Image (cartoon, rainbow, N blue to C red):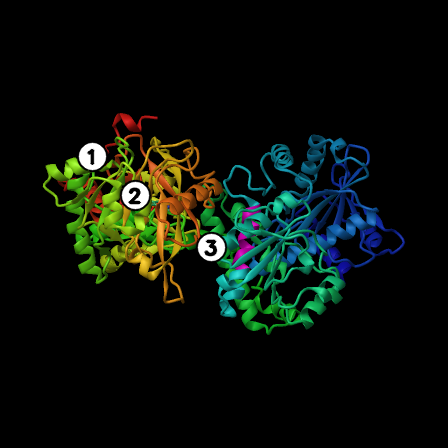
Amino acid sequence: MITNLILLVLLSNAAAKPFIRTTRNNIFAFQSKQAPTVTAPLSKNDFFTIIEDPKKRGATVLEAPVEQEGVKLYIAIDSASFQNKDRPGNGGIRLLSYQSKEHAIDDAVRLAKGMTRKHDMFRTGFSGAKVVIDHDHEDLSVVKRDTLMRDAAKALKALDGSMYTGCDLNTSDEDMDFLTKFTDDKYVLAGRNSRVDTNAATASSVIGSILGVLDVNNEIISELTFTVQGCGKVGSIVARELLRYGAKCVQTCDLFSENAEIPGCVPIDDWTKSTCDFFVPCANSLAITETVANNFPEGVKYCVGAANSPYANERARSVFDERGVLHVPESISSAGAILADSVEWYDIDLYQTVERSLMYGWIRDISRTKSSSLVRKADKKATNIGTVLRAVVPPRIGDPIGKEFPEWIKKNTVETDTVIVGGGVAGTAAAFALSEKGENSVIVERGSSIAPATASSNGDSRMYRRMYSSEFFSKMQSKALNRWKDVEEKSGETLLKENGLLFYGEDTGETVEGSVLGAKEIMDKLNLPYTFYASGDEIAARYPSLAGCKGKPYSGVCEDTAGHIRASKACEAMVKAAGQHCDVRVNSKITSLDVKEDKVTVITENGETIIGKKAVIAAGPWTNEVLSMAQLPQVKLSIWMVQWAHYEVDRKVAESIPQAFHFRKENDIDGGLYYVFPATATEAVTSTDSTKSYVKVGVDYPTNEALGDMKKFSYEGEQEVLDLMDGWVKEHLPAIGKRIDSYCSPYTMTDDSYFVMDTVRPNVAIFSGGSGRAFKFGPLLGDCMVSLLNNDDAPIDLAPFSLGREALKM
Ligand SMILES: Cc1cc2nc3c(=O)[nH]c(=O)nc-3n(C[C@H](O)[C@H](O)[C@H](O)COP(=O)(O)OP(=O)(O)OC[C@H]3O[C@@H](n4cnc5c(N)ncnc54)[C@H](O)[C@@H]3O)c2cc1C
């Protein structure tokens, strides 16, 4: 029947496609079992040898001439596409050494048929095809790539638009460049001249398919463990994406163990023995043998990955099936690259200019819909999924799916007055201030929540104080406190707790946080109330928990009206207070920023486009990364790793631990500055033991070389610094118990400790360089940014924060 199909296609296309002359002799030859190959004469010169299909494998197989010795080139193409430019074949070129010609052809046909299933599944406009280059060299490097690609190009040209190809096993971007050149930029769909990475496209379809499964089964990703088998170009992206979507645990495994070392993932040695809910095969074909399937640890519920033909045979697959493992076929889960191809073929200009996260978002969406529709129709049996597959395959006629991409982009575009990049204190304050002017905003936040754990604004508490060595910041705090009251009122949340703040320690001179005596001077000047302690003994007498002060040449100033702000809660409250004027997108890292005079466009990694008339860039330590997306000038910032932790303490003792800042001179790697928050400021940690509570202790000096960006930032921090902190606690707060956790957060510093608050374009305001002190000014910073954007009078003098100042020059 297949042979007949081939004949039919050959006959029906013979007149239109002159390159293969289908003479009666050839027809007889096809039907003859004795003659395995037939040379199809071309009109001018012979080109392909058509390999007859005695095994009825189900695709047309051609052999093309190759110049170099020891290399054969076979093309398997869905018979419906053969010589059909309207529905061309599409599949990559792979280069392998096969046992025999038969093996090579079998592989080509198997892969072409698999490709047909994928193309059909999504109506890409293509059928399946594959180019298999069989070489008999021990060492692949002796194959001359340029001449080989020249030969492949001749074959593609001879197929005259009925076959497109791209990279596959052992072929590279460089090969594709040759091929593109030799085909005059035709017939190669390899993502060249585009930002789209075909590996990321494939990973997007895996993730989309996983999400589809979760949707239907009401599974919560944060409760699931995944095993990603194979952490190559696709698997490594899948693993990182699973983390981004909040997977409870992502186990990674690779033949080369260093590939499995992905930050946040848990490398494992043997994927066949590790318990997981979700198995994600992204390595070689045929890896799940019957034995593996039988012995796979209990608990596995789903199998969705990028590997083609993950099961060694039908039996292996039915073992998983019998164990109730739901399997989404790879014709859905690894179709990302061909979905991208569909756009590349349909609209090359769009493909070459589009921001890649839009493409990945589209692929994720399509795969998610397809996978959930498949799973809904199936019960939890893999074989049943096989049988319902047909129900989710669209008819071949109709527009190719790539044509839907522009419409999808439009549907995923949101317009607002102001786009705010970053949902820390600066971003949320801007949203709050804008809402008070009746203006709408969308906050785009890369983390999984407002003030996420990775941001500077995250945590249970930040100090507020007017006790500064600088009159400017002291006055600024007074203004900001009034605005915090507004936030509390409008959000209905209590955010500030007045628990006093003690500055104490030795005469250090001015430090990054000021000094005891400098603060006293300004308090006197501004007539602010405080209590003064002239010696370490006086301090210890007032605060018995600070027993370490005894006998020390210390002094202390306590501002009784200072206190702490509930940090993460305050950011959430500003969004709450902004009400309907503010939309928030979390898990939405922006990947592109385009600034025009009256329009700012950001694109998120989820594939959403947000357009505002104005923008606020409040990206904290990631500021320069965001600025560079729009080729805006970089700002001189340095990033410090600062560490903090909670310590257990008896509830009774806790009552005598004040909010305090300890000034000491630097000593080697010990920066000298430590602070403690009282038990009333540590709501993030609770104890079931009613006799215990917690205090927070932190260091206020860089615990590593200051960094230029976040690439090398470690949220783990340094053990040496934890040791210093533990030592400080032991010496200065001897009544405190053990440390129960530890954190490391970024400070974004400027050389002069003033913030960066200005416009980078008339319609784009920026805030950064919070320099370990910005939180307390939160809502006032929002007012300042809005005044900058709207050209209104600012509530304070903004000159000290201007971008043009000397301290910010690179
Ligand atoms: C441990 C610690 C203690 C501190 N103590 C005090 C204190 O006691 N008192 C005080 O006043 N101040 C204090 N500070 C300083 C204050 O917390 C910070 O200055 C302030 O939180 C900075 O806020 P931000 O909004 O500028 O940055 P962040 O809070 O870091 O917010 C930036 C946000 O932008 C997001 N983002 C970045 N890039 C992208 C992107 N491409 N797409 C989408 N989103 C993106 C980030 O995820 C982040 O959430 C402290 C800081 C730390 C770290």
Task: Identify the main secondary structure in magenta.
Answer: helix
Q: Is residue 530 visible from the viewing direction of this image?
A: yes
Residue 724 coordinates in the image, percent (x, y):
43, 41
Of the residues tagged 2 and 3, which is closer to the observer?
2
Q: Is residue 309 left or right of residue 527?
A: right
Mark sitting on residue 518: 1
353 versus 301 height, above or below = above
Disc nearest the viewer among 1 and 3: 1
Image location of residue 153, percent across then percent down: 67, 37
Look at the numbered disc 1 and give the secondary structure of its residue.
helix
- The disc, 2 or 3, on the residue closer to the chain's N-terminal end is 3
Question: Mark 3, residues whose alpha carbon is within 10 Å: few (<14), some, or many (≥20)?
Answer: few
Q: CA distance from mark 2 to mark 3?
A: 74 Å
- The residues tagged by marks 1 and 3 sit, at their Cα atoms, a distance apart of 65 Å
Quadrant containing ligand 1: top left
**Which residues, given as a range, are shown in magenta?**
199-209
Residue 641 in the image: above or below residue 691 = above
* 1 or 3: tag closer to the N-terminus: 3
Whether residue 398 is visible: no
Q: Earlier in the sequence, mark 1 or mark 2?
A: 1
Question: What percent of the width, then of the height, locates residue 718?
Answer: 47, 41
- Which image quarter holds the N terminus? bottom right
Q: In the rendered structure, does residue 419 fall within the stretch colored magenta?
A: no
Give the number of the disc on residue 550.
2
